Amino acid sequence: PMAGLLTTLPLLCFGIFSPVAPRLARRIGLEWAVGASLVLLVVGILLRLVTPVTALYAGSIIAGAGIAIANVLMPAFVKREFSEHPSGILGVYTAALNVGAAAAAGLTVPIGTALAIAWRPALAFWVVLAGLGFALWLPILLRSRRLRAVRPALSEADQELAAAEDIRGFVLLRSPVARQVTGYLALQSFQFYSYAAWLPTLLGDEGIDANTAGYMLMLSNLTGAAGALVLPVFIKRLRTQRPPVVAVTLFYVVSLLGLLVAPSAGAWVWVCLYGIAQGAGFSLALTLMVLRSPDTAVAARLSGVAQLIGYLVAATGPVLLGVVHDLTGGWEWPIVVLLVLLGPMLWVGLGAGRDILLGGDADSTSRYPADRSGSVG
């Protein structure tokens, strides 16, 4: 039960704290809100080093809050600073997340073994990496402070955020585009977290030892980084994002069919293909938030509500697949569930991939006017 809760807790935190991020950005500024999220991440990891189990849970919640805030605000930051080519920056961001996940899966135990320490002290290595992330963000904070000293008034983007009080997250869901972007992120996250939670067990049931299964999960995350980096090369050549949506779905289909038909014989291939799909898929979901939003404020709000719903939906995935496995006694039907859900994921993805803005003419039910001053793609 404790392991299951620790697996689900970060997802619940991602969902619960996502709506906090736009409000925090309005009050202290976009750069400082992201900086605060990195501080929360460091504090959360430090708490996980402490022995009492309550500190372990508290650290998980605080770190989850930090990651949630950063994830929500990154599309808004990219919308403001890199609106012409957002997919490249978000691809690098997603790749970094995948490399971090791969390192966590593959290096925490070896570090502890090499240093003859338990797994908790080995987590101190990740405090260093989180601190490095804050150090890399520090010049952006200092630049923001200098700009405010020269020009005390809020920047145009922060004015948009400050004026966004009426753009409450769920009101955005009146827009078909917002619902499609949210649905794509939710179903993509459901796929990934269900797969990540049960892949080692599935492989173990096929006779693959635990160490090898762990390395396969690490490899899946590394290929996810590759998928996230390659995706922008194609997006910038296309007028719409529908072709990448189809390509990501095909990678999912092939990898899941492979796990269904030949789970052990081709396991290394299937985990690589699935990794490419999830890395490119998450990067694409973030990119859609930016490309469909007319301004920074809407990007922050859309990101907040999409990740609130998306991660709460994703949190049900490991539980649902576990129930299906227990009822059927095997992994065939859980994989079929993931395959079936690719249908609605493709459908909402094709809708979200259209070349339109939230509030534009094609998005007729939204009450938010599009900014027609120029293209954002």
Image (cartoon, rainbow, N blue to C red):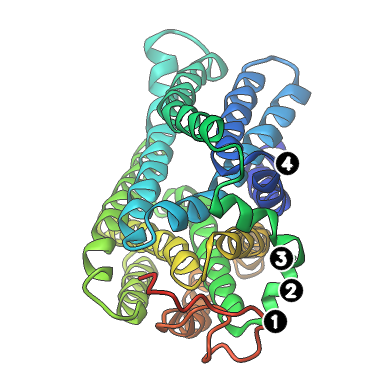
Compared to residue 153, the image places residue 358 above or below, namely below
Task: Give the residue number, with chain letter if any, for mark 3.
Answer: 169
The answer to whether mark 2 and mark 3 are in CB contact below 8 A is yes
- Left or right of 351 in this view: 242: left
The answer to whether mark 1 and mark 3 are in CB contact below 8 A is no
Indicate the amino acid at tag 2: Val
- Left or right of 61 in this view: 306: left
Quarter holding the N terminus?
A: top right
- Left or right of 257 in this view: 229: left
- Residue 1, label in figure: 4
Q: Does the image show residue 72?
A: no
For marks 1 and 3, the one nearer the N-term is 3
Indicate the amino acid at tag 4: Pro
- Residue drawn where x is 61% and y is 78% of the image: 179
Q: Closest to the observer: 108 or 60?
A: 60
Separation of marks 1 and 2 at Cα, in angstroms: 6 Å
- Examine the image and state in which quarter residue 273 appears: bottom left
Q: Closest to the observer: 316 or 76?
A: 76
- Examine the image and state in which quarter residue 356 appears: bottom left
- Residue drawn where x is 36% and y is 73% of the image: 257
Pointer 2 local density, CA inside 10 Å: few below 14, some 14–19, many at least 20? some
Q: Which-is-in-front pick, marks 4 and 2?
A: 2
Separation of marks 4 and 1 at Cα, in angstroms: 38 Å
Task: Give the residue number, with chain letter if any, for mark 2.
Answer: 171
